[in-house]
Image: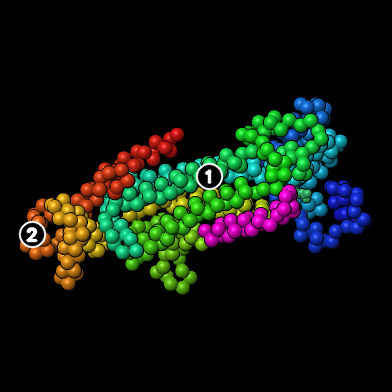
């Protein structure tokens, strides 16, 4: 028996007669990625030990030895001096082995009434719960930064698009607040998922529960879980909560990606609506004139990676019979990378959004180019008594004439306009201006500067709670 194998054999069993090959060891080990769960693993173990002692399953002195050992392990991990061993397979066995080195038999008693199956499910739930709290806090920071931009530009006019063609004038503040709404729903979705994440699997042991007189509610309370998982087989095997988190994360990235696409277009000199600070851009190694919006482009690209993780997790789960299977070890890397990607993206977006500078003249000029007030003219005729479909038709003729003459609707003479409908009078010019057009959409959810201000107040109220 090699020295390395003896370490491994100690970890689970003396039942095996030959060592696993190095390749199998590497293939099955998870310590190099699941060591990220270390602090949650310790937190779960301490809660378990506390309950074991309270129930008289271990002694009070075993419990305090376990606490002493865990405190030492924590500081070793924080200091970077903890020695992670591939031979010990995963984060759980590495910590337990070190604990036993430090405190002897008390360390060996920690695993009473528990299995790595319910232990790892508990760790991941603690990890996802903390990730949700970080994501929600960052979403709120991003919403706040976008709301600040909206406030600075509550009446800055830009063209609103449908089919990427100028449709109607809108305010830039209104456009920013559209993203504030999306990210608000994303935060709600995360908080909703949190309720289902926040259940305690511990006590399920390997799959069937344990013969020891445990108190699961006590552990749940210590760890801040709202309840226990009510079926031991389900508790150790399902990762639906991780899938739900990744699905909610995918929606965040989808929104980020849509926004990125707009930023990239707006920054393009062909459009020139905004600028972002140089620190979010890079130059080209060959074309000296270039300033490339790398950050939004990468965010758009990284969206695919998070969608990929969602597909991985769904696929990981779909063929698994009850209860725990080792397949589940594969849940961690997609989950960790999802968390890293979403958190970094939200951080960088918050910073970048705060530094958006708006080129209001370019926005205005673009809004004047596409007959953006044509609907206003149709609405004007309707208010004078013309049925909407007839108004639509009259304005279509007017737009065609503008196109031929190369002028905007607001630049036509009154006489020319009256040729399209005798109902047109000289009050028409008030509705044909960009300012008149946006100001007229003055109802909840509309683009009027007045409404943008109200919407900002509403969001600020939400962000305060
Ligand atoms: N490293 C394992 C995982 O992540 C821990 C549970 C292992 N349980 C087992 N019976 N092999 O899923």
- The residue at 42%/61% (across/down) is 261
Whether the magenta-drawn stretch holds residue 89 is answered as no
User: Disc 2 or disc 1, which is closer to the eye?
Assistant: 2
Q: Is residue 323 magenta?
A: yes
Residue 301 screen position, x and y as percent:
51, 62
Residue 280 or residue 325, whichever sits in front: 325
**Residue ID for mark 1:** 190
Q: Give the quadrant of the C terminus.
A: top left
Give the residue pinned by disc 2.
422
Render colour scheme: rainbow
Q: Position of residue 66 (x, y in %)?
A: 78, 34
In the rendered view, does 371 fall on the left or right side of 17?
A: left
Q: Which numbered disc flags the more N-terminal residue, 2 or 1?
A: 1
SS of the residue at dot 2?
loop
Relative to 201, is 271 on the left or the right? left
Q: Is mark 1 within 8 Å of ligand 1?
A: no
Q: Residue at x 8, y 54 (%)?
A: 426
Tell me where residue 25 appears, x and y as whole percent: 80, 58
| Distance of label 2 from label 1 (alpha carbons) | 56 Å
Q: Which residues are magenta?
A: 302-328
Residue at 60%, 51% in the rendered image: 243
**What secondary structure do most residues of the magenta stretch adopt?**
helix
The answer to whether residue 224 shows anywhere in this view is yes
């Amino acid at each position: 028996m090699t020295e390395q194998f003896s370490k491994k054999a100690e970890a689970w069993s003396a039942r095996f007669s030959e060592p696993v090959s190095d390749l199998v060891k590497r293939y099955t080990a998870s310590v190099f990625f699941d060591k990220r769960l270390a602090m949650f693993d310790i937190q779960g173990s301490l809660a378990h030990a506390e309950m074991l002692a309270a129930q008289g399953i271990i002694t009070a002195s075993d419990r305090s030895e376990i606490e002493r050992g865990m405190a030492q392990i924590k500081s070793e991990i924080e200091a970077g001096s903890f020695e992670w061993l591939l031979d010990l397979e995963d984060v759980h066995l590495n910590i337990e082995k070190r604990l036993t080195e430090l405190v002897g038999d008390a360390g060996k008693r920690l695993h009473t009434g528990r299995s790595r199956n319910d232990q790892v499910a508990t760790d991941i739930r603690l990890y996802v719960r903390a990730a949700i709290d970080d994501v929600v806090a960052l979403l709120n920071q991003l919403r706040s930064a976008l709301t600040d931009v909206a406030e600075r530009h509550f009446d800055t006019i830009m063209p609103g698009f449908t089919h990427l063609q100028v449709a109607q004038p809108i305010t830039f503040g209104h456009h920013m607040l559209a993203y504030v709404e999306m990210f608000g729903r994303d935060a709600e979705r995360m908080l909703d998922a949190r309720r289902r994440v926040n259940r305690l699997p511990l006590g399920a042991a390997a799959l069937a529960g344990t013969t020891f007189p445990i108190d699961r509610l006590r552990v749940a309370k210590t760890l801040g879980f709202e309840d226990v998982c009510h079926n031991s087989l389900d508790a150790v095997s399902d990762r639906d909560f991780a899938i739900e988190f990744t699905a909610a994360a995918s929606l965040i990235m989808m929104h980020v990606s849509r926004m990125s696409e707009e930023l990239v277009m707006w920054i393009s000199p062909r459009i020139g609506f905004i600028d972002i600070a140089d620190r979010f851009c890079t130059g080209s190694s060959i074309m000296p004139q270039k300033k490339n919006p790398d950050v939004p482009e990468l965010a758009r690209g990284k969206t695919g990676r998070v969608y990929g993780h969602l597909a991985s997790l769904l696929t990981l789960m779909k063929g698994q019979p009850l209860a725990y299977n080792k397949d589940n070890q594969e849940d961690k890397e997609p989950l960790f990378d999802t968390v890293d990607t979403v958190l970094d993206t939200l951080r960088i977006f918050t910073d970048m959004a705060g530094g958006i500078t708006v080129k209001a003249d370019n926005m205005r000029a673009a809004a004047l180019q596409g007959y953006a007030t044509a609907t206003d003219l149709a609405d004007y005729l309707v208010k004078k008594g013309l049925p909407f479909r007839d108004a639509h038709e009259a304005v279509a003729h007017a737009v065609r004439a503008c196109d031929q003459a190369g002028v905007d609707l607001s630049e036509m003479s009154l006489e020319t306009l009256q040729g399209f409908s005798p109902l047109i009078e000289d009050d028409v010019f008030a509705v044909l201006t960009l300012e008149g057009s946006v100001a007229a959409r003055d109802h909840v959810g509309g683009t009027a500067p007045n409404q943008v201000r109200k919407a900002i107040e509403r969001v600020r109220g939400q962000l305060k709670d």
